[in-house]
Image: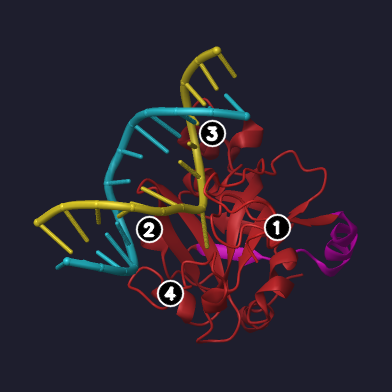
Chain colours: A red, B yellow, C cyan
Amino acid sequence: MTHTSDQLRAVLSRPVLEVAPQLLGAHLRVGEVTVRLTEVEAYAGEQDPGSHAHRGRTPRTGVMFGPAGRLYCYLSYGVHTCANVVTGPDGEAAAVLLRAGEVVDGLALARGRRPGARDRDLARGPGRLCRTLGVELAHDGADVCGDSGVTLTLPAEGEAEALRPRVRWGPRVGLSLAADRPWRCWLAGEETVSVYRRSPRATPIGNSG
DNA sequence: AACAGGATCCTCT
DNA sequence: GAGGATCCTGTTA
């Protein structure tokens, strides 16, 4: 559906576990490259031991504590930019990590940004997705509901309905804390969905609360 | 000022 | 499936 920016922000302001599956099938456009999202993870803010916001607000995580619809970008391992869409009411630090997608526009440019990668791997993984789209730390705080150069388009109503039965849930990738919470969701049958890896530092299965 | 720990990726085998 | 690269961030002193 083509939402106004107010409608989109209203959707994103809902609880993060409600918003996350609605982002599956959505199109994220940055400049000339567009990715169709196939896998995301929900992070529930200060209550969630797996979230960067767990220990409160810091310079890095500040955007997450603001209103829904902004991009929270951070550096993973000091090297890879990863991006989240902030969700929930203003003041609540919930966000959805954009884990993987399929390039549906700007393929030539995307390939140039990821030399040697197969097409299915262009945006398979949160760091790769940002590299492919050209998302960098400078995009931290960009409003996907506004005129920031980053545009989010939710699936049309009929398509969202068609996708619903294909949504699967499982544990989030690579977390040492709260490793068992099934807050990652993806579209079954999509070849761009990334491979699950459990953190070697995570507690044994079932013991992490 | 120093340290420990990553919401990852790539290259092997 | 395993291991290393690599450097930012938050915490502690």
Residue at 66% x, 83% y: name it: A10
Mark toward the start of the polypeptide (2 vs 3): 3
The residues colored magenta run A150-166
Q: Amino acid at mark 1?
A: Gly
Secondary structure type for disc 1: loop
- The span from disc 1 to disc 4 (Cα, nearest Å) is 23 Å
Q: Which residue is mark 2?
A: A137
Q: Are marks 3 and 1 in contact (CB under 8 Å)?
A: no
Q: Which residue is mark 1?
A: A206
Q: Which residue is mark 3?
A: A111
Residue at 48% x, 54% y: name it: A82
Secondary structure type for disc 3: helix
Mark 2 chain: A
Q: Which residue is mark 4?
A: A55
Secondary structure type for disc 2: helix
In the picture, measured across the screen, residue A161 lies left or right of residue A22, that is right
